[in-house]
Image (spheres, grey):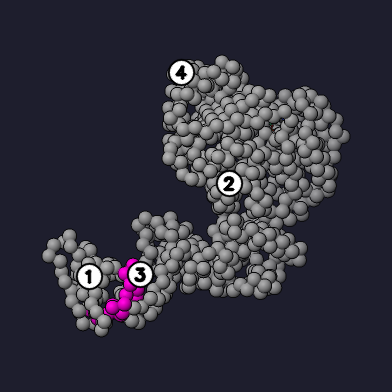
Amino acid sequence: MRPEALFPLFKPVTSLQGIGPRLATLVEKAAGPHVVDLLWHLPGAIIDRRYAPDVATARPGVVATMTLRVDKHVKPPNKRLPYKVFCSDDSGTMALVFFHAHEDYLHKTLPEGEIRVVSGKVEQFGKELQITHPDHVGTADEIAKLQAVEPVYPLTTGLTLKVLSKAIRASLEALPDLGEWIDPAYRGQQGWKSWRDAVLEAHGPEDEAALESTAPARQRLAYDELLANQLALALVRASMRRIKGRVIEGDGALRKKIIDSLPFRLTVSQETASKEIAADMAQPIRMLRLLQGDVGSGKTVVALLTMLIAVEAGHQAVMMAPTEILSRQHLATIEPLAQAAGIEIVLLTGREKGKTRDAVLEKLASGEAALAVGTHALFQDGVEFKSLAMAVIDEQHRFGVHQRLTLAAKGRAVDILVMTATPIPRTLMLTAYGDMDVSRLPDKPAGRLPIDTRVMPIERLDDVTKALKRSLDGGAQVYWVCPLVEESEVLDVAAAEDRFAQLKGVFSDKVGLVHGRMKGKDKDAAMEAFAGASTRILVATTVIEVGVDVPEATVMVIEHAERFGLAQLHQLRGRIGRGSNPSTCLLLYASPLTPTAEARLKVMRETDDGFRIAEEDLKLRGAGELLGTQQSGLPEFRMADLSVHGDLLAAARDDAAIILNRDAELESERGQALRTLLYLFERDAAVLNLRSG
Ligand code: ADP
Ligand code: MG
């Protein structure tokens, strides 16, 4: 349960004074739905109102706070001209200018003959100085209450700075004092203030330097967030460890059969990874290991060999993939091999229903099926295994699935191997997985030919079509990837359908189509037709990005390549270059290219080294945007910026380990504060891993 001290922070923003339902929608859009989201919504700029000149010395173009006598209101002769209020001090005269003025209101706030303080940007208009629509008007007392240096927050259409600032000020008033969760020595060494003071300071920048992610207040808040992230991961892991694992050792008979039936030899790194995994499984603790290898590095075989260890030991194993297409693809790869070894394998996704599903469930419960492939449907209620010992999770580049799964598999002594295809930098790896054991597949299977990648303007579509004709005559198969239309799957599909129709006009029934909105059956049919080469060009949206394996496909055309991220382009391109024939990738772009897009395409042309691409991506986009956090499932940070706060992440990881070593249940005083920290950053699920959670 969330600690009471945090209750005010998790109220909806409507609980703040002056925020009704209409404004709440806007505030929510800018910052988030809860009061706490406003705390994380930090200023991006400042307006310095400390400049307080008299009229004679005021510099145009600068924000000034001026004390003036209100002399005279002058109504315009017609509505298109502005209403003016002339003011003065001992040094001179100037005007305040208002368009679409509310006369009554102006008379009230600027009564003739009175002294008022006015703050806004000074402008020169002909010979006259003026301020158009001053930001603040009030008596000296009223203005004194305003911040001399005003924070400027990121806004959204329809939301004014005044309204948002007011809401944020109100949220800061609700700020509780929370127990300290940072190690006192570390905090002292960093010179950080308490959490509450750090939040206040982050919202009250005195100068530009205070806006940097390296400013102490921001560093402290970033550290808090990273500590919550690392502690949550460490807790999940510790709770997995608590359930005793089983010693799983096989005699190697099944593995040998399958290795012998492979048309290739394992690479050195595949062998090494298999050995590391087997050693882990032979330990009486639960395995949680990451298998990291670039697209095409041959993870599937390693996964299969891992699963076979469980089967050799008389247990069952499953492989879970993020999509149905990918599950089927895995089944297609694994089934013939399994059959060669006399092992039954079943498929379970959301699409298996009725009798088919019943039959699958029966086989899993009886142990008749030793292996299963599928989506998360494998871990739904009602799915029973006779003796599940091993789960492979194929995340490709959509991180985070393992966290949900470890929770789902809680209580079962299942060894877990997570497969990921994205060679993300180590820092990002830590935020997604914590300190997980890692096996890597750095080298690709021998004999792979480099992919010839070319970048060309989309105006050359006709040439491309002609070249395709030649390739098809030479026996090639082609992926044609259609552009991502911004955030609209419907438009994506329309674009893919148009391209499909156009190519069909040229290549008739050699063309197939697959996209995310098709029914499962139709998707399969399209994929199967392409895999069996009865269609030779597959027009697709990015659904083919993940995992699909058709070695005969040697050409890929990516339309509007400039709209894709680097990691995504790399993933897509990894679909070709898998066979023994040379492959070509055509990146078609529409002008004008932004400098970033140009840089991305250049990197793609220069290298197919996944690690280099990941590093370049980090440089080009910054960590927050790497891979497009949304779809990648990487944790999104509000305070931390990994391109700057890498050191803090390492410290947070070490701290999390020390904390759990000393106080595994978070029961000490600091432990209680740390629980609050987890709730503060909405890592509620992690707390469930504590016995008294
Ligand atoms: P990924 O790591 O992207 O999942 P896959 O496991 O799908 O890669 O393997 C890519 C292709 O490489 C498959 O066609 C697979 O059969 C083949 N392959 C895997 N290991 C080897 C090897 N040692 N030598 C040659 N080909 C291999
Ligand atoms: Mg794969």
Eye-nearest disc, 4 or 1 = 1
**Residue 533's quadrant in the figure?**
top right
Q: Residues within 10 Å of mark 3 (few under 14, many from 20)?
A: some
**Which residue is labeled 4 in the image?**
506
Cα gap from disc 2 to disc 4, whole angstroms: 37 Å
What type is the residue that disc 3 sits on? Val
User: Residue 103, percent across and down?
Assistant: 19, 69
Eye-nearest disc, 1 or 2 = 1
What type is the residue that disc 1 sits on? Lys
Cα gap from disc 4 to disc 1, whole angstroms: 70 Å
Looking at the rendered structure, the secondary structure element under dot 4 is helix
Mark carried by residue 617: 2
Give whichever of 27, 366 is nearer the camera.
27
Eye-nearest disc, 2 or 3 = 3
Q: Which residues are magenta?
A: 54-70
What type is the residue that disc 2 sits on? Asp
Cα gap from disc 1 to disc 3, whole angstroms: 17 Å
Looking at the rendered structure, the secondary structure element under dot 1 is loop
Mark carried by residue 127: 1
**Would residue 496 be seen by someone viewing this image from the given angle?**
yes
Is the C-beta of the residue carrying label 4 under 8 Å from the nearest atom of ligand 1? Answer: no
Looking at marks 4 and 3 on the same chain, the residue that comes earlier in the sequence is marked by 3
Eye-nearest disc, 4 or 3 = 3
Quadrant the N terminus occupies: bottom right
Assess whether mark 4 and mark 2 are in contact (beta carbons under 8 angstroms).
no
Looking at marks 1 and 2 on the same chain, the residue that comes earlier in the sequence is marked by 1
Cα gap from disc 2 to disc 3, whole angstroms: 39 Å
